[in-house]
Structure formats: C-alpha cells, structure tokens
Image (cartoon, rainbow, N blue to C red):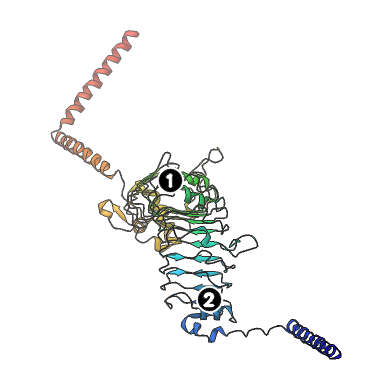
Amino acid sequence: MNRTKSVFLAIAILCIVVSQVNCQSNDDTTTKPEKPKEKISVKDSKLCSKCHCNLETYLLDCSEKLQDLLSAEEWEVLINGDVVFKTINLEHNNITSIPILPKYDVENLYLANNQIDSITEGAFQNLTELTTLDLSHNRITSKVLVPDVFKGPYSEHDFSALEKLKTLNLGYNDLHTLDADLFEHIPNIEELVLCSNAFHVIDRLSETAISGLSSLKTLDVSYMEIDDLPETILHGPRDLETLIAAGNLFHQLPKALSRATNLTSLVLNQNPIDSLIEDNVFPPLTKLTHLSMTFMTKLYKIGPGAFSELQGLTELILSDNKLLNEIDEEALSKNVTLGPYLDYPPLEKVYLNNCNLTSLPKNLLVRWDKLKALDLRYNPWNCDDSNDYLINVLIEQVNKTTPILAKNVQCATPTTLKDVEVVRVANEHLMESSSGSIIWVGLLVILLIAVPTIAGAYVMKRRNCFGVFRRNDSVARSALYNRTSFNEDFHI
C-alpha cells in the first residue's frame, strides 16, 4: 500500500514538473517574437541584373526582358526587398495569362503589348494600392473580361472594391461588348480607354457599364467602328472633361454631346461628317476649350452658328480637311446679351492649314489680334482684293507673332501670282483687283469711241469746217441784234 502511494506521489510530482516546463516554454514563445526576415537588397538581386531598376523613381522596367510573368523567386525579391517599386513595366513580353498576383504595393502596372488571352478572377485583388492598369494591345475578349476579374481582397462578408484604381486601358483588344456590371469592383475609374476595339455599336450592356462610372473624366472611344453614341451614355459621367471619338463612322454630331455639359476637350478627327449646317451644329458646351476636327475626308462646309454655342473655345483645330472650302463668317458669333454687338469665343489658337480655303471672312473673328497662333498654310488662297483683310492685315500679324506660320501661305490665283507667298504680296503691294478685267474692258470701249471722234474732229478742223460755224454764228448774232433794236423802237 505504501508502495502504491509512493508511485502515485512520484507521478504527481512528475506531472507538476512537466506542466511547469510547458508553461515556461509557452512563456518563452510569447515573450520572444520571431526574428524578422532580413531584407533582400533589390539592387544586387538577379532581378535587377535582368531588368532595369531605377531606385530614384521606384521603377522596375522589365519590358522585352521576360518570356512570362515574374517567377516565384523574383516575386520573393520584390515582396521581401528593401525597395517598393511604385511602377512595374512588363510590356512587350510573351505573357499569355494573368494569375492571382501576390500582395505588393505597386501603383502603376503596365501589361500592354503581350499575348494575354486569359485573366484569373481576382487577379489583381492583392494589389490594393493599384491606381493605373494598362492591358492594351492584347487578345482579351469580352468573354474573358468578366466583373470578378477586378474584384478586390476578400473582407468579412464579400470581396471589397479596388477603390484606388483610377485609370484602366483596354484599348486594342478583341472586345465587342462590355458586361453591364464590369466596373462594379472598380467604381472610381476616372480614365477609361476602349479605343480600337471593333464594337460596331455600343449596345445596351456597354452603355449601362459606361454610364455607371460617375467619376469618369476621360473617355476614349476612338476607332471603334461606331456610327453614333447612345443618347444617354454620358448621362452618368457628369464630370466628363475629355471625350475622344476619332476615327469612327459619325455622319452627324452625336446627340449625346448635349449631356456632356462639363466637357473641356473634344476630339472628332477622321469622321465622315460632311458639313456643320442647320440642325447639325454643336449644342451648348460652355466649358469646352479645345475642339479638334481634322482629316475629315468629306467635310466641305462650316455654316452659320456651327460653333456659336462654344463660347469658351480657346483652341480650334480644323486642319487637313482637304475639301473644306467655306467657313461662314457667322460660324463662331452669337448674340449672348441680345444687344447690338455679337459675342465671340476667346480663341487663342486657330489651325486651318491643309484645307481648300480660298478666302477668309474678316468677321469670322473680331479680335484676330488676340490669336497666339494662326495657321493658314497650304491653302489655295485667292490674292485679289476680295481677300483684302488676309493680305493686308492678318498675314502681317502672323509674320510678327509666328514667322514660321507665314511661310507657305501662298497664292493660287490669279495665275500671275500663283505660288507667290502672301506676305510678299502684302509687302510689295502685288495684290490684284478682282474688278481689273472690267476696268480694262471699260478702257477699251472708251478708246474705241474716243479715237474715231478725235480723229474726225481733227479732219474737220483741217478742212476749216469750224470757220463756217463761226461765220454763221456771227450772222445769227447780227440778226438777233437787229431784231432787238426793232423791238425796242416798237415799244417807244
């Protein structure tokens, strides 16, 4: 019995000792944190020997350096490195797919000019600091680009948004439509580029997606082979400032422009609009300062009121419109105050080079002297007095402010001044009168009448015909005198 008690006592003592050892071990664990991993020197890594590492601008440039995405070892260098690169450039490689990328505080990620045709859902969810994402010039289809591609990190109940993402470039891919909820995880997009995707038409789903971007400031829908914009597509992005819609199939100005009331810059280059007349003129866009309509292969006329509602315009670019031969003198003016004077936009730069203009209306602008740049080069200018203001006033102003823009402003007519620079016509007073031919015809008629008359008078004088007239005149005066004397005698 005593023996048994001794055994139990020994076991109890052993348990107490083991328990104390375990507690001591636990105390050591909690009071002594793990030693932090030593930071990797990024500058001396294999990654920076392969790619260009700019430690001053925090740029990692691996363009044309990789066959695929960064390897696990290379990501390890970035994650545990002593430098955090804010910009990573992976352009012009052979990347075909994007998996879920590791957690890293990169802000600008460039994946353009690859072969990407596959993107894993949540691929960017660990890049919570991402502000710019460039996926242009790839093979991304509408089927691949689903809303969950852009979902953020998982929170307690759901995936959160990538709230810091502001710029998304999807240009030059194989998109033909957008999922209506495509931007639900990236609601703060300010710049969206969709150029050179063959949409052909912006359907209802795409319109819903774009119109839901309330923070959008820049929208690029150029070269998408569309012939119009849905009328309500710009209703949601109330703060839209820049719209680029070049290289499409617009025959008329889109009605959707009337909703873009905060627009400051508009680019409509290379659209088959043939004229700006009647109902096809710009709606009120009071904040618009920059308008570009170049390389319009069918544009031939800009009529009255075309730009009248653009009273904030400072730069107007109408260059390289080979058929444009008429700009109405009331194209820019508007009677804002309903008073006796017209109002004009405060234009500073006007580009009319490489068109088919022969004359420029003086009243197109009132304060031509306020212009900092006026490009009139390579037009077939008419150098007679119908273009007096251009020749005697404007070209001198251009020559003083920007001499390079005065060169190659040449006459096309009349033939005697063909290819002569207008500034020379002004300086040497070579301008011809548009009524010169009429004057010459008049002089010829006068000469044809005057020469025979003078010659006849000379012959008559030589034959003393005028002496007969003088004698007859003397007889008449004598007879008149005699009749007067007779009458006087009769009265007496």
- The secondary element bearing badge 2 is classed as strand
Q: Is residue 382 visible?
A: no
Sequence order check, earlier mark of 2 and 1 = 2
Q: Name the residue under label 2.
A: 59
The residue positioned farthest toward the left in the image shown? 463
Amino acid marked by disc 1 = Leu
Placement of 91 over or under 318, stated as above or below: below
Name, please, the residue furthest toward the right.
2
Asked if the residues shown at circle 2 and circle 1 are in contact, with their CB atoms under 8 angstroms apart, the answer is no
Label 2 crowd (10 A; few <14 / some 14-19 / many >=20): some
- The structure residue drawn at horizontal position 27% and vertical position 51%, both measured from the top left corner, is 414
Q: What element carries label 1?
A: loop
Quadrant of the image for the C terminus? top left
Which is in the foreground here, disc 2 or disc 1? 2
For the question of whether residue 182 can be seen, the reply is: yes
Q: Which of 449 and 131 is in front in this view?
A: 131
Real-space CA distance between mark 2 and mark 1, rounded to the nearest whole angstrom: 42 Å
Give the numbered dot on residue 253.
1
What x and y, as percent, mark residue 302? 40, 45
Front-most of residues 283 and 8: 8
Query: Residue type at mark 2?
Result: Leu
Residue ID at (40%, 68%) = 115
Where is residue 321? Give x, y as percent: 35, 53
